Image (cartoon, rainbow, N blue to C red):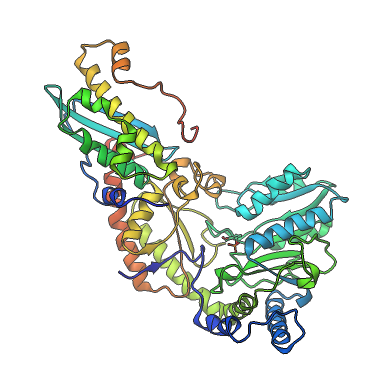
């Protein structure tokens, strides 16, 4: 059975071109980039080339880019780093209710350490409430951290407006752009972004490597203590192969961004349209327009997400759900609850995230499979039975 | 999340799915907020459960525990069915991940509720006797998630 991979928001397949440029760094180019002999020096250069590539895409200076072990580390470094470095100025941080756990848990940790955090709500489409954001600003606010695009419902936030507000008030602005990089053009100058997190495995690069942009003169405390790597801001022998892979991946992603986006958006729209046409009693979650091109999130009423995923898996289809059983906690996704979905509808959500390797044939296969599975699970569902017995209207 | 082959087998080919139109008793447990509801229909003749069907809204484990427990009580006397413990269901499935144990508890409770409903319809026992015999739990918050 073929695998139909539709979980590109979770991670992506490493592009062959990316893998090719990485491989030598596992074999002949194994030198430590801090060493002075040639196989070390060459690796230093490879790292700096990759840094240049990231800087060019973000429109920042290469000495404002730090390599990390991924999106979670970048978020931790930015938020904790900026918070601790600026705590003499204030102890208040603003974020949103729909952040990734890498941000939310970091903020919760800071709350235990004397910081105060405001979690701003979002509307029914998942767009941040800007008025609430403005109203929550205090004289002690030192940092605003709002994600660029959401990993579950794909909603893209009003980053430019948030950047303007932050700049006007003299508050540092960090954005978790892990889902956005590779999908959206980002200019940190134009958008007044002071710090940004990205992760290579979301744009056809390797896992376990990311980058953090921090604007020059924004003080932040080093997160991983040890050696002097990354201009003494992140200790640890550099993951040269990973860094080279990240550099290549970001370059490729932006080389044909418009083409890539057009292709996956078309497939996504086709998927949503087909599901809407062929399956009744569904709800499309997240903003229809301000969203990542490959993301779709649909709730299928009267059924539960994990059983949907298991049945899709039996057909070789990989996707994800915001149901409690898949979130690893006992509640469904905090994002779906934040956009006001009742629990039972949040339990029945399915995220299908399309990537550059997907085809229309795969989408047709998935929709056909969904029609069959949803019908079968509904026929098994007491909620559906009740709904039909009550005349099918509520 | 690791499911045993037997669990996979039961959620892919659940036995006894459906509804019994002239059921002797119906039991429904769980709630949509937690993400699990089980509804069990039984047909009783001469104190024997001659038929049983279920409908479940829930995860793979919820479907598998419903399915296997219907198999385990079919053809049994009411007393034997009341003896069925959630741990028996788990064992029969070759185990369940710890976070899914509550699904087996729901299956046990659904059977008890269905039998209680049968006794109520029969009208020979007082509510107190039924609660005792069927070991009914008070309707309270879901132990697993607090809803
Ligand atoms: C929005 C967002 N932030 C952070 C992360 C964490 O990134 P990583 O898996 O590279 O640590 C992810 C990915 O899971 C994400 O989607």
- Residue A70 falls in image quadrant: bottom right
Outermost residue on the left side: it is B46
Q: Horizontal and vertical percent for residue B136?
A: 34, 21
| Residue at the image position 27 percent from the left and 26 percent from the top | B83
Which one is nearer the viewer's eye here, A9 or A27?
A27
- Residue A279 falls in image quadrant: bottom left
Question: Is residue A386 rendered to the left or right of residue A320?
Answer: left
Q: Horizontal and vertical percent for residue A281?
A: 37, 49
Q: Is residue B92 above or below residue A23?
A: above
| Residue at the image position 30 percent from the left and 61 percent from the top | A369
Q: Is residue A165 visible?
A: no
Quadrant holding the N terminus of chain A: bottom left
Q: Is residue A247 above or below residue B43?
A: below
| Residue at the image position 80 percent from the left and 69 percent from the top | A232
Q: Horizontal and vertical percent for residue A167?
A: 81, 60
Q: Is residue A146 visible?
A: yes
Q: Horizontal and vertical percent for residue A35?
A: 75, 81
């Amino acid at each position: 059975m073929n695998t139909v991979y539709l979980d590109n928001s979770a991670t992506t397949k490493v592009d062959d071109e990316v893998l090719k440029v990485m491989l030598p760094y596992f074999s002949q180019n194994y030198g430590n980039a801090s060493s002075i002999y040639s196989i070390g020096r060459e690796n230093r250069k490879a790292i700096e080339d990759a840094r240049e590539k990231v800087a060019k895409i973000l429109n920042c200076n290469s000495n404002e880019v730090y390599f990390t072990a991924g999106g979670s580390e970048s978020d931790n470094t930015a938020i904790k780093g900026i918070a601790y470095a600026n705590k003499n100025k204030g102890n208040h941080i603003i974020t949103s209710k729909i952040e990734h756990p890498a941000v939310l848990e970091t903020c919760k940790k800071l709350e235990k350490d004397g910081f105060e955090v405001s979690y701003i709500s979002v509307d029914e489409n998942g767009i941040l409430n800007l008025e609430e954001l403005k109203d929550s600003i205090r004289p002690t606010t030192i940092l605003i951290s709002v994600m660029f695009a959401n990993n579950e419902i794909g909603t893209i936030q009003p980053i430019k407006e948030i950047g303007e507000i932050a700049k006007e008030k003299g508050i540092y602005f960090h954005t978790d752009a892990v889902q956005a990089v590779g999908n959206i053009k980002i200019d940190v100058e134009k958008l007044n972004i002071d710090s940004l997190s990205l992760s290579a495995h979301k744009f056809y690069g390797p896992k376990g490597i990311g980058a953090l942009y921090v604007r020059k003169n924004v003080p932040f405390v080093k997160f991983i203590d040890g050696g002097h790597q990354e201009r003494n801001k992140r200790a640890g022998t550099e993951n040269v192969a990973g860094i080279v892979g990240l550099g290549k991946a970001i370059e490729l992603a932006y080389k044909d961004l418009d083409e890539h986006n057009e292709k996956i958006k078309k497939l996504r729209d086709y998927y949503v349209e087909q599901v809407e046409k062929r399956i009744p009693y569904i709800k499309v979650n997240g903003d229809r327009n301000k969203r990542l091109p490959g993301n779709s999130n649909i709730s299928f009423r009267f059924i539960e997400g994990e059983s949907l995923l298991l049945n899709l898996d039996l057909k070789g289809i990989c996707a994800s759900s915001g149901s409690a059983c898949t979130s690893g906690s006992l509640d469904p996704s905090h994002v779906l609850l934040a956009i006001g979905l009742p629990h039972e509808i949040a339990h029945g959500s399915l995220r299908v995230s399309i990537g550059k390797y997907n085809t229309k044939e795969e989408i047709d296969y998935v929709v056909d499979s969904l029609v069959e599975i949803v019908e079968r699970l509904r026929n098994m569902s007491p909620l559906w039975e009740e709904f039909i017995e009550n005349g099918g209207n509520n | 999340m690791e499911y045993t082959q037997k669990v996979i087998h039961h959620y892919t080919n659940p036995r006894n799915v459906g509804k019994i139109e002239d059921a002797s008793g119906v039991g429904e447990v769980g709630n949509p907020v937690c993400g699990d509801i089980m509804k069990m229909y039984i047909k009783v003749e001469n104190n024997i459960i001659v038929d049983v069907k279920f409908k479940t809204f829930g995860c793979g484990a919820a479907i598998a525990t419903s399915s296997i427990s219907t198999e385990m009580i079919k053809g049994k006397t009411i007393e034997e069915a009341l003896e069925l413990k959630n741990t028996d269901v788990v064992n029969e499935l070759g185990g369940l991940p710890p976070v899914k144990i509550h699904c087996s508890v729901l299956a046990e409770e659904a059977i008890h509720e269905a039998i209680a409903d049968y006794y109520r319809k029969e009208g020979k026992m007082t509510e107190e006797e039924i609660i005792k015999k069927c070991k009914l739990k008070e309707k309270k918050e879901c132990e697993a998630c607090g809803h």
